[in-house]
Image: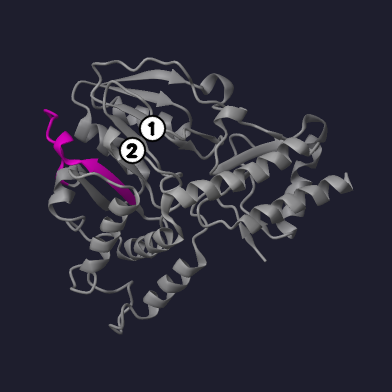
Amino acid sequence: MKHNFCAGPAVLPQEVIEKSAQAVNDFEGTGISILSISHRSKEFKPVVDEAEALVKEILSVPEGYSVLFLAGGASMEFCRVPYNFLNKKAAYLNTGVWAKKALKEAKAFGEAVEVASSADKNYTYIPKNFEIPADADYFHFTTNNTIYGTEIRKDLDSPVPLISDMSSDIFSRPIDVSKYNCIYGGAQKNLAPSGMAFVIVKNDALGKVERYIPTMLNYQTHIDNGSMFNTPPTFTIYAAMESLRWLKAQGGVEEMAKRAKVRADMLYSEIDRNKLFVGTAVDEDRSYMNICWVMAEEYKELEEDFLKFAQGKGMVGIKGHRSVGGFRASCYNALPKESVQALIDCMKEYEAKH
């Protein structure tokens, strides 16, 4: 049996995979594949509508917000966000590679200040006690840092509207959407296959910048056209709808938050107990979604050997990002607790051999 700990594209519920596969063969009894049906057809329009409605229901999105499904990934939004929201000045928290890239793009559109950074310790912690400038148009932060295994699991207090990249922990916990002008992310973690970004945008926060915004980069374009201004990623939207149906049936984000804590507590306990391994993120900022660890210093030479051992036991995708090395277990919503237990058993068995 394979246990999928890939960081993204990542594990999806088996039920979602099966229903999506069925739609590839025959979408809703049309005799046509979801891969080749028109996005303008009467059969497909309800898919977009239901997916949008489910996002709003599951996250308790208040009135006055739009949900968009756009081609591309979160990296596209790194520039689309400042294009639409940065008029004079924006504030950014630098907690990792993706946050740093978002900040870089914002600097092309106006003053973008870094309020704090954890780069000094290779992003192994979340900065604290920083000051957000009250004259900023928005404050941007990345909630979960997949490469380094740190996470902000709360809606921050801010004197200005929040904007957040929630690519890798969206739908894993409740959030107060009313604090945000925009929430965005790539779909390929907790939502759907790759190829799409989701965007939740506050309608009346738009139209405030003085610059011309190219048509495709203007959020208002996509709001006015219901994510259908151009041909959308139809299959990914369909899979997202099925994933959201599954999520609702499982108990929503409240249930996902409970499961995430259980999985993380199990694996972190083993990392802390096992003499061969050491966690990389500081305890208080450890991610529930991406759990990172390395071999203890005296066992460094065993890193490749353990990786091969784990792969032989069915563990897929646990090699750490090249910038930090070691190991990473991505524990997204669809990952069963049994997979985490299988990894723990594998770690214990390897420890007993050494």
Residue occupying image coordinates x 50% and y 25%: 126
Q: Is residue 8 left or right of residue 91?
A: right
List the single residue furthest toward the right: 353
Q: Quadrant of the C terminus?
A: top right
Q: Tell me, yes or no, whether the highlighted magenta stretch contains residue 203.
A: yes
Residue occupying image coordinates x 42% and y 31%: 99
Q: Residues within 10 Å of mark 1 (few under 14, many from 20)?
A: some
Image: 207 above or below 173: above
Image: 246 above or below 104: below
Kindly identify the amino acid type of the residue bearing the numbered disc 1.
Asp
User: Which mark identifies residue 176?
Assistant: 2
Could you tell me if residue 319 is visible in this image?
yes
Tell whether label 2 touches label 1 (CB within 8 Å). Answer: yes
The residue to which callout 1 is attached is 155
Segment colored magenta: 197-215
Kindly identify the amino acid type of the residue bearing the numbered disc 2.
Asp
Image: 11 above or below 101: below
Q: What is the secondary structure assignment of the residue under circle 1? A: loop
Q: Tell me, yes or no, whether the highlighted magenta stretch contains residue 244.
A: no
Quadrant housing residue 328: top right
Disc count in the image? Answer: 2
Whole-percent x and y of residue 104?
A: 36, 28
Could you tell me if residue 329 is visible in this image?
no
Whole-percent x and y of residue 239?
A: 38, 64
